[in-house]
Image: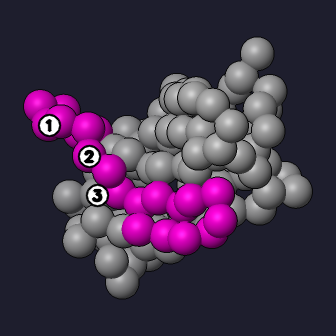
């Protein structure tokens, strides 16, 4: 079955960095675009960054200049490098894979907690 497993979350001080990973299995990864979303208590889930199957990228305004999304199709993994972290980046981060070619399919990971605090 399809699995998306996030890792790399944790507690970091303001100004610090984290790299999140989303490892996929059970699907043809190169056919999927992958998104990173986040959700903090009392707020709606919001899109942070995306990478298409062709490698195009999108960033929310809150992520521009600080976050970088990349993918390694050979490892079926997408990364989210987060720099200059702020307390408002505290959230559960989820990866989401959406099939872009050859049919439909959408999958979510279980999430990884990122806490930015001194």
The one of 110 and 28 positioned closer to us in this rendering: 28
Residue 30 place in picture, x, y as percent: 75, 51
User: Which residue position holds label 2?
Assistant: 46
Q: Residue at x 36, y 68 (%)?
A: 59
Residue 38 place in picture, x, y as percent: 34, 44
Q: Residues within 10 Å of mark 2 (few under 14, many from 20)?
A: some
Work out which quarter of the rendered image holds the N terminus and state it: top right
Q: Is residue 44 visible?
A: yes
Q: Residue at x 32, y 50 (%)?
A: 47
Q: Residues within 10 Å of mark 3 (few under 14, many from 20)?
A: many
- Earlier in the chain: of badge 1 and badge 3, it is 1
Q: Residues within 10 Å of mark 1 (few under 14, many from 20)?
A: few
Reply yes or no: does residue 44 show up in magenta.
yes
Reply yes or no: does residue 106 show up in magenta.
no
User: Which residue position holds label 3?
Assistant: 89
Q: On the picture, is 98 further left or further right than 114?
A: right
Please give the label number shown on residue 43. 1
Which type of secondary structure does the marked residue at label 1 adopt? loop
Which type of secondary structure does the marked residue at label 2 adopt? strand
Q: Are marks 2 and 1 in contact (CB under 8 Å)?
A: yes
Which of pointers 2 and 3 indicates the residue nearer the eye?
Answer: 2
* Residue interval drawn in magenta: 39-58
Q: Residues under labels 2 and 3: Cα distance?
A: 11 Å
Residue 109 place in picture, x, y as percent: 55, 30
- Earlier in the chain: of badge 2 and badge 3, it is 2
Which of pointers 2 and 1 indicates the residue nearer the eye?
Answer: 2
Q: Is residue 117 visible?
A: no
Q: Residue at x 57, y 29 (%)?
A: 104
Q: Residue at x 49, y 70 (%)?
A: 57
């Amino acid at each position: 079955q399809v699995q998306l497993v996030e890792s790399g979350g944790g507690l970091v001080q303001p100004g610090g960095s984290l790299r999140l990973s989303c490892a996929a299995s059970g699907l043809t990864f190169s056919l999927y675009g992958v998104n990173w979303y986040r959700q903090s208590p009392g707020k709606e889930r919001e899109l942070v960054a995306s990478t298409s199957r062709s490698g195009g990228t999108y960033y929310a305004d809150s992520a521009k200049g600080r976050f970088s999304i990349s993918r390694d199709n050979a490892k079926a993994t997408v990364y989210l490098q987060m720099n200059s972290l702020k307390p408002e980046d505290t959230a559960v981060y989820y990866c989401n894979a959406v099939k872009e070619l050859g049919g439909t399919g959408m999958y979510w990971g279980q999430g990884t907690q990122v806490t930015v605090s001194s």
